[in-house]
Image: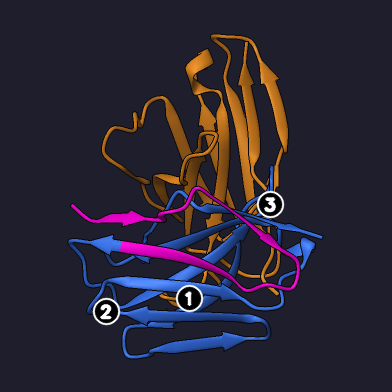
Amino acid sequence: SQKIEQNSEALNIQEGKTATLTCNYTNYSPAYLQWYRQDPGRGPVFLLLIRENEKEKRKERLKVTFDTTLKQSLFHITASQPADSATYLCALPYGGSQGNLIFGKGTKLSVKP
Amino acid sequence: GAVVSQHPSRVICKSGTSVKIECRSLDFQATTMFWYRQFPKQSLMLMATSNEGSKATYEQGVEKDKFLINHASLTLSTLTVTSAHPEDSSFYICSARDQGTSSPLHFGNGTRLTVT
C-alpha cells in the first residue's frame, strides 16, 4: 500500500536560516504533491502544489522540489522567521475519482529568534 | 478565497450521547466534502467522503452507523458521532475543494470533541 513519510518529527532552526523539510513516499507514482501548514488547534492551510512534470516550484520564501526518481519532495523556507513556526504536512492523492489525499504525519518546525 | 466554516470548534459531551458537527462552504459550492480525524502528533486520517445528494463513502475501518454523514446541500455537510465513547475523543476536520480534483483542499478549523 502507499506510504508517505516525513522523516523529521521536529526541526529547530535559528531565525534567518533556511529550513528544509523532507517528504518521502513508496509504492506510488503520484501525479502531484501538495504541502500544507497547520497551526495548533487549526485546520491545515494549503501552501504549494507541484506536479510530476515540475522539478521545482516557488512562492515568495517557499520552494518545493519533486524528484520522482527518488520519490521525494523537499520543502524549503528561506530567511525563516519565528512566524514560520508550525507543523508542515505533505499530501499525495491516493486514487479514486474524487481526489482523496493521504497526509504525512508532519514536521513541526520551530524557528528561534 | 474559498472559506470552509466548521462548527462547533469545541464540544464536550457525556458518553452515550450524540454530537453533530457542521461543515459549510461559505463562498463556493461543494459537491464533495471530506471528513478527517486527527490524533495528537498523528497525521490526518480520512474517515469518509461526503457526496451531495447521495451516500457517503467511508474508509476501511470507519463505522458508518457510528459516524453518520449527511450532505443535504451544496454548501453543508454534517457529521454526527452517535453514542459517543471516550475513544471517540479526537480532532475532527472537514475540507472541500472549490475547483477540480487536483486543486487544494480548503479546511475548516476543526472540532475538538471530548467525550467524558
Numbered marks: total: 3
Q: Amino acid at mark 1?
A: Ser
Q: Are marks 3 and 2 in contact (CB under 8 Å)?
A: no
The quadrant of the image that shows the C terminus of chain B is top right
Q: Calculate the distance from the C-alpha at mark 3 to the C-alpha at mark 1.
A: 21 Å
Q: Is label 1 in contact with label 2 (beta carbons under 8 Å)?
A: no
The residue that appears at 65% across and 37% down in the rendered structure is: B111
How crowded is the residue under tag 3: few (<14 C-alpha within 10 Å), some, or many (20+)?
Answer: some
Based on the displayed image, in which of its 4 quarters is residue A38 positioned? bottom right
Image coordinates for residue B71, horizontal then vertical, percent: 50, 49
Palette colour of chain A: blue
Q: Distance from label 1 to label 2 (Cα)?
A: 20 Å
User: Disc 2 marks which amino acid?
Assistant: Thr
Image mark 1: chain = B
Q: Secondary structure at mark 1?
A: loop
Q: Nearer the viewer, residue B23 or A64?
A: A64
Circle number at residue A2: none
Q: Residue at (70%, 75%) from the top-left corner?
A: B1
Question: Which residue is tagged 1?
Answer: B103
Q: Chain of mark 3?
A: A
Choose mark 3 or mark 1, whichever is in front. Answer: 3
The chain in orange: B
The disc labelled 3 sits on which kind of residue?
Asp
Residue matched to label 3: A39
Instruction: Give the labeled residue for mark 2.
Output: A68
The spot of residue B70 in percent (x, y) is 49, 42
Task: Give the left or right position of residue B58, taking residue B108 as reference.
Answer: left
What segment is highlighted magenta in the picture? A1-24
Magenta span includes A80 = no
